[in-house]
Image (cartoon, grey):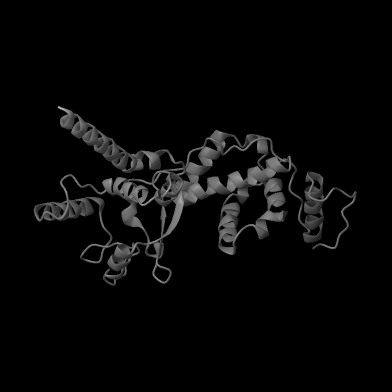
Amino acid sequence: MTGTRLTPPHALGSPEWWQALQEARARIAGEPAERPGTWGALVTSYRASPRFPKDLAPRTRKDYQAVLDYLAPLHDVVLTRWSRSFVAGLRDKAQTQKGRRFANYVLSVVSVVFAHGIEFELAATNPVRDVRKLRRPKGEALAAGRDSWNRTAGTRTRISAKSGKVVVVKAPEVVVAALHRLPAHAAATLLVNSRGEPWAENGFRGSFFRLIRTLEAAGRVADGLTFHGLRHTAATQMRRLGFDTRTIADMLGQETEGMAAHYSREADLEPKLRGVVTKLDEENRKREGSV
């Protein structure tokens, strides 16, 4: 608290109240207040709101602040310049400088700040709308960091290649057993080859299909098994166990239920069609008995 009376008095939480609070804090700090209608003023308002300290976990708040610090040089840019193309340019620049994940996080934080601005009538629109997040390149799953596996909690953290959604999920027992068998290594990635080095995509693909051919020859897997086909198999199995498409979508890291419904359709059809065949068999037996 500054201990300074806001003059003239404003309605608590109103845009005028936030601006007066910002100016009072700036006077005490001996720093000029952010110019109204700029990114800096919007960020100041957001950080002063109860949502920033209360609605965010400490780690999330720290990550948000890292993005706000990265964007600090733009503090004097007027909000009318923050168009979709402007934000897309920021995304691409952040990707070049700090990588895809940080670039996507920039979009998330900017969107939250502008949502605050719209709510308090400090901004008219959210320029992040319709700006696409960067998709994970093929093969990036092999680059999952060692910290993506929480051995104590038994959870895996991953980012869906389809949606960019962060998914934290308890690892199945068979996966836990496999991860516990991983050899000790100094690589930054979770998965390594027999030499204790990060997998190259071509090397992994070759090793995977050699294993598949061996298992096919032994009759342990069906023909045509692919790595990406496991997603379809998992969705089908979850549907047969009675999980709804929203739960399946969350497990797969999908934003919408569309693909979950597509993947699980086979599970819905199989018992349905089995019932059709049963009825047909009953009808045919009746006909045979009447001849």
Q: Is residue 272 left or right of residue 38?
A: left
Above or below 224: residue 48: below
Q: Quadrant of the N terminus?
A: bottom right
Residue 135 placed where, x, y %?
41, 43
Residue most toward the left?
Answer: 217
Q: In this rendered view, identify the residue nearer to me: 110 or 56.
A: 56
Q: In this rendered view, identify the residue nearer to me: 51 or 224.
A: 224
Above or below 53: residue 110: above
Q: Is residue 145 left or right of residue 45?
A: left
Q: In this rendered view, identify the residue nearer to me: 173 or 87.
A: 173
Q: Is residue 118 left or right of residue 198?
A: right
Q: How many marks?
A: 0
Above or below 285: residue 114: below
Q: Quadrant of the C terminus?
A: top left
Residue most toward the front?
Answer: 290
Residue most toward the right?
Answer: 8
Q: In this rendered view, identify the residue nearer to me: 26 or 268.
A: 268
Residue 158 placed where, x, y %?
41, 55
Which of the 4 quarters of the picture holds residue 60?
bottom right
Which of the 4 quarters of the picture holds residue 281?
top left
Q: Residue at x 77, y 60 (%)?
A: 29
Above or below 61: residue 33: above
Residue most toward the top?
Answer: 291
Residue 278 placed where, x, y %?
25, 38
Residue 227 placed where, x, y %?
25, 49
